[in-house]
Image (tube, rainbow, N blue to C red):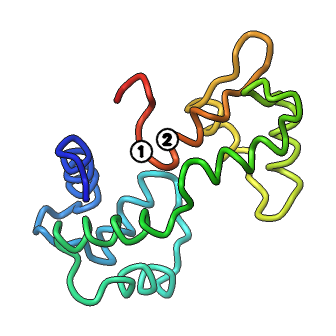
């Protein structure tokens, strides 16, 4: 299901989330890790819903299985690329940053300023303001930059 390098990355993520290092991710662990990321107002109900996504205690095996199930439901890379191509009629392989930002902040599930800042930090446009959407699609479906693979 996962390559060894991916398993190691998930193990590192699990270790970060498991704040009390007991081998189980609890509501308190989630609350603590979300607080370190600036999410200070997460309700008990939201935390409970997160924990209840698992059928029992969230140890590393369950954590890995949950990620596998989530990724299995993700669209294949070619489907996501095709969606971006609709926004790229010249088939240049990129979209202008301003155009993409306008779409992401004004349509459907709107991105916040912080989410846009994070997006541009992860996928910086080139000097001409172009965003390589194929790289974004690759990371969405594979979890790492092509250059890192």
x, y percent for residue 108: 82, 64
| Residue 35 placement, left or right of 85 | left
Q: Residue at x 22, y 62 (%)?
A: 18
Disc sitting over residue 54 in the figure: none
Q: Nearer the viewer, residue 138 or 57?
A: 138
- Quadrant assignment for the N terminus: bottom left
Tell me if residue 43 comes above or below residue 89 in the rendering. below
| Mark 1: secondary structure | loop
| Location of residue 55 by image quarter | bottom left
CB-based contact (under 8 Å), mark 2 and mark 1 = yes
Give the percent coordinates (x, y) of residue 23: 12, 68
On residue 139, the disc is 2
Q: Is residue 139 above or below residue 14?
A: above
Numbered label attached to residue 143:
1
Percent position of residue 89, x then y:
88, 35
Does 128 sit above or below residue 147? Answer: above
Residue furthest to the left: 22
Quick check: 122 above or below 3?
above
The one of 46 and 138 positioned closer to us in this rendering: 138
Which residue: 36% across, 26% down? Answer: 148
Q: Circle 2 sits in a helix, a strand or a loop, which is it?
A: helix
Q: Tag 2: Cα neighbours inside 10 Å, few (<14), some, or many (≥20)?
A: some
Using a 10 Å C-alpha cutoff, classify the residue at mark 1 as few (fewer than 14 neighbours), some (14 to 19) or many (20 or more).
some
Which residue is more in the foreground, 57 or 78? 78
Could you tell whether 30 is left or right of 146 in the image? left
Q: Is residue 69 left or right of residue 113?
A: left
């Amino acid at each position: 299901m996962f390559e060894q390098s991916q398993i190691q990355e998930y193990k590192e993520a699990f270790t970060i989330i498991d704040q009390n290092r007991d081998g189980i991710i609890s509501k308190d662990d989630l609350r603590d890790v979300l607080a370190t990321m600036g999410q200070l107002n997460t309700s008990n109900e939201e935390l409970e819903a997160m924990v209840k996504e698992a059928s029992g205690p969230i140890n590393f095996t369950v954590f890995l299985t949950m990620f596998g199930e989530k990724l299995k439901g993700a669209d294949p890379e070619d489907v996501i690329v095709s969606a971006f191509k609709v926004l790229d009629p010249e088939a240049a392989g990129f979209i202008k940053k301003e155009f993409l930002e306008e779409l992401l902040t004004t349509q459907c599930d709107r991105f916040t300023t912080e989410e846009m800042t994070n997006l541009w930090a992860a996928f910086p446009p080139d000097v001409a303001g172009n965003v390589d959407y194929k790289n974004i699609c690759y990371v969405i479906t594979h979890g790492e930059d092509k250059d890192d693979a």
